[in-house]
Image (cartoon, rainbow, N blue to C red):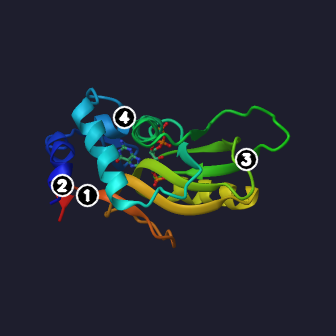
Amino acid sequence: MDSTLEPLARSLRDAPVVDRDGYHYFVHGVTDGIPPVEPDVLRAIATGIRDRIDLAEVDKLVAPEAMGIHHATALSLATDLPFVVVRKRAYGFPEEIVVRGETGYSESDLYLNGVDAGDRVVLVDDVLSSGGTIEAVCDALEECGADLQDIVVVLRRVDGDHDLDRPVTSLLDVRVEDGELVIVD
Ligand SMILES: O=P(O)(O)OC[C@H]1O[C@H](OP(=O)(O)OP(=O)(O)O)[C@H](O)[C@@H]1O
Ligand SMILES: Nc1nc2[nH]cnc2c(=O)[nH]1
C-alpha cells in the first residue's frame, strides 16, 4: 500500500459495525465523524486524492452532505479550489436541481445549487457502497450541464451491490466480513 495512506489504513482497524435494518454499516471518523477524525488522517486523504486525480483544470469540488464535506474541506485547503455542498435541504433557488438519493439503508432528496453549465467539477465523497448517492449527484450535475471530470471516494465498499457504470477512484477498497471492516488489497 502507498505509505501516504498508512494513517488512514491504521485508523480503520477495529471500526465497529452496526446493523441498520439488515445493512452491515461500519462506523468510522472518515464516514461518520465518530470516533474523532484525526488531522493526520485528513491530511493523508487530501494528499492521496491529489496524488491520484488531476486537479489542474478543475473549477470546483462537489461534495454531498454530510460526510463528503470534511474531505472536500481538506482538499479545498490543500488546493485552493472552492467547493459546493449538495444539500438534503431545499433552498428554492430558481436553478435548484432536485434528485432522489438512495443508499442501502435510507433515501432522501438531494438539492444541487452553485454549479453552473460548463463548470469543470470533481465529485468527492467519503464512501461508495450501493452507488445510489453518486448516481443521483451525477444526474444532477448532468442536468445542470457541468463537466464532471472525476469521481473520488475515500473508501469503496466492494461488497456493495452496486451497478454504477462510471469510473470511480478510491483511496482504499474495503468490505465488511464477519462483522469486521477489512481492507481489500
Ligand atoms: O453508495 P451509497 O449506498 O449511496 O452510500 C454512500 C453514501 O452513504 C452515506 O451518506 P448518507 O446518505 O448515509 O448520509 P450522511 O453523509 O449524511 O451520513 C455516505 O456519506 C455516502 O454519501
Ligand atoms: N459510515 C458508513 N457510511 C456508509 N454509507 C454507505 N455504507 C456505509 C457504511 O457502511 N458506513
User: Do the residues bearing badges 1 and 4 touch, measured as CB atoms within 8 Å?
Assistant: no
Sequence-wise, the earlier of marks 1 and 4 is 4
Toward the viewer: 129 or 139? 139
Q: Amino acid at mark 1?
A: Arg
Q: Amino acid at mark 3?
A: Val
User: How many other residues sit within 10 Å of disc 3, few (<14), some (14-19) or many (≥20)?
Assistant: many
The residue labelled by disc 2 is 182
Q: Amino acid at mark 2?
A: Val
In the figure, 130 relative to 91: above or below? Answer: below
Query: Disc 3 and disc 4: Cα gap in Å?
Result: 24 Å
In the figure, 184 relative to 40: above or below? Answer: below
The residue labelled by disc 4 is 32
Image quarter (top left, top right, bottom left or bottom right) of the N terminus: bottom left
Sequence-wise, the earlier of marks 2 and 1 is 1
Sequence-wise, the earlier of marks 2 and 4 is 4
What's the residue at 77%, 43% (across, down)? 96
Image quadrant where residue 34 sits: top left
Q: Position of residue 98 (x, y in %)?
A: 73, 47
Query: Disc 2 and disc 1: Cα gap in Å?
Result: 5 Å
What's the residue at 37%, 49% (across, down)? 22
Q: Position of residue 113 (x, y in %)?
A: 71, 41
The residue labelled by disc 1 is 175
Can you tell me whether the CB of the residue at mark 4 lies under 8 Å from the nearest atom of ligand 2? yes
As helix, strand or loop, the secondary structure at mark 1 comes to strand
Decide if residue 180 is in sight here: no
Residue that protrudes farthest toward the right in the picture: 94
Sequence-wise, the earlier of marks 2 and 3 is 3
Q: Which mark is residue 5?
A: none
Q: Which mark is residue 98?
A: 3
Image quadrant where residue 90 sits: top right
User: In the image, is 182 to the left or to the right of 146?
Assistant: left
User: In the image, is 103 to the left or to the right of 181?
Assistant: right
